[in-house]
């Protein structure tokens, strides 16, 4: 089952189950996926079973929801600061090549000067898929923001004027809610665009943290249940109605150097990420970037990331926004 969040024609929030490419069936009695997940937790009912029991006979035109700008992100939190967006890198087979090429200009070509990226990748290949009951090697990790950094599908992703780049990263995101005891519970998965500033990162690997503090988008559909082991997708950039770059990508554990469980274990081992009632959105990484092919996205370009596994295409235009750096005052 795949779910979306949207607003009705009267402006009320709603949750819908995707029937097919053109049809959504509205759920009864819930206004958000967060509310639905809380009901599943309190009742002890599996999320998909609960969603199925709430299906109505109210069928809606999916394309009309999109055309009228009524799509929402497939998960949010009533208080955006209670939603964390983070992720892991160097998790996909081939991801080290893109990263190494990005930083090659800062190296004289000696192998020992390129070992941070390759060493981390090698560690993942050798220890990212541990046997049951064992602890695997921890991945690269980054913080992206809270719920305020999430942009709804079809809406413009803002890039601050001080940014040196605004490049797409087609990734799968895991969606979680913590129960009343702080135990993480996976709601599902969504296709996402983990927008990053690759030029800033290329200046120095220690700028990675800065490069990730950007907006992102995921959805429009939330896939319930387990993630397929093999996922195929396509990422493209459209400029003035023409495709200027397009490339296929692979994901799922068959194409990764880490298991999803290992990435989850190393994220949720920290108490800060296990606060009761909080939502976690965790990007799992990619090996495919237009930046690696010399593409520089411009304002007005539209990012499109799609995979049949996740239903409708995630589409977002890019918008450059003026960002005045505030002056710190003494109280």
Image (cartoon, helix red, strand yellow):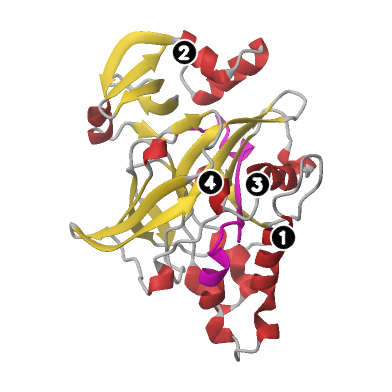
User: In the drawing, what numbered circle is on residue 252?
Assistant: 4
The residue under the point 76% across, 55% down is 137
Magenta residue span: 74-98
Location of residue 330 in the rendering, given as x and y in whole percent from the top left corner:
69, 61
Q: Secondary structure at mark 1?
A: helix
Out of 59 and 112, give the one closest to the viewer: 112
Contact (Cβ within 8 Å) of mark 2 with mark 1: no
The residue under the point 48% across, 23% down is 32
* Callout in the foreground (1, 3): 1
| Quarter of the image with the N terminus in it | top left
Q: Secondary structure at mark 3?
A: loop
Mark 2 highlights which residue? Answer: 52
Q: Secondary structure at mark 2?
A: helix
Label 3, residues with CA under 10 Å away: few <14, some 14-19, many ≥20: many
Label 2, residues with CA under 10 Å away: few <14, some 14-19, many ≥20: few
CA distance for labels 2 and 1:
41 Å
Tag 3 or tag 4, which sits nearer the N-term? 4
CA distance for labels 1 and 3:
12 Å
Out of 24 and 206, give the one closest to the viewer: 24
User: In the picture, residue 179 is in which quadrant?
Assistant: top right
CA distance for labels 4 and 3:
9 Å
Contact (Cβ within 8 Å) of mark 4 with mark 2: no
CA distance for labels 4 and 2:
26 Å
The residue under the point 61% across, 71% down is 207
Contact (Cβ within 8 Å) of mark 4 with mark 3: no
Location of residue 42 in the rendering, given as x and y in whole percent from the top left corner:
66, 13
Which residue, as the protein is rendered here, is positioned at the far bottom? 108
User: In the drawing, what numbered circle is on residue 288?
Assistant: none
Tag 2 or tag 3, which sits nearer the N-term? 2
């Amino acid at each position: 089952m795949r779910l979306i969040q949207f607003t009705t024609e009267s402006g009320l929030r709603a949750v819908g189950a995707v029937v097919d490419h053109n049809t959504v069936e509205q759920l009864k009695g819930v206004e958000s996926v967060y509310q639905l997940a809380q009901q599943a937790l309190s009742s002890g009912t599996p999320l998909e079973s609960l969603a199925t029991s709430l299906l109505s006979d109210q069928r809606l035109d999916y394309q009309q929801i999109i055309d009228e700008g009524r799509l929402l992100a497939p998960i949010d939190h009533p208080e955006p600061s209670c939603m964390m967006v983070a992720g892991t890198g160097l998790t996909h087979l081939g991801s080290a090549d893109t990263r190494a090429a990005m930083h090659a200009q800062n190296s004289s070509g000696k192998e020992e000067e390129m070992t941070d990226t390759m060493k981390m990748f090698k560690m993942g290949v050798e220890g990212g898929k541990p046997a049951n009951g064992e602890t695997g090697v921890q991945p690269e990790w980054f913080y992206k923001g809270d719920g305020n950094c999430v942009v709804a599908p079809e809406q413009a992703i803002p890039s601050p004027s001080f940014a040196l780049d605004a490049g797409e990263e087609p990734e799968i995101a895991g969606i979680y809610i913590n129960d009343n005891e702080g135990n993480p519970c996976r709601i599902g998965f969504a296709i996402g665009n983990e927008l990053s500033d690759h030029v800033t990162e290329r200046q120095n690997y220690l700028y990675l943290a800065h490069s990730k503090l950007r907006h992102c988008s995921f959805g429009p559909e939330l896939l319930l249940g387990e993630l397929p082991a093999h996922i195929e997708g396509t990422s493209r950039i459209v400029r003035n109605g023409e495709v200027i770059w397009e490339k296929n990508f692979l994901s799922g554990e068959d194409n990764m150097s880490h298991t999803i469980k290992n990435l989850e274990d190393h994220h949720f081992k920290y108490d800060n990420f296990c606060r009761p009632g909080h939502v976690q959105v965790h990007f799992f990484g990619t090996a495919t970037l237009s930046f690696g092919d010399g593409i520089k996205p411009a304002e007005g370009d539209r990012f499109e990331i799609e995979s049949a596994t996740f239903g409708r295409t995630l589409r977002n235009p890019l918008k450059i926004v003026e960002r005045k750096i505030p002056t710190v005052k003494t109280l």
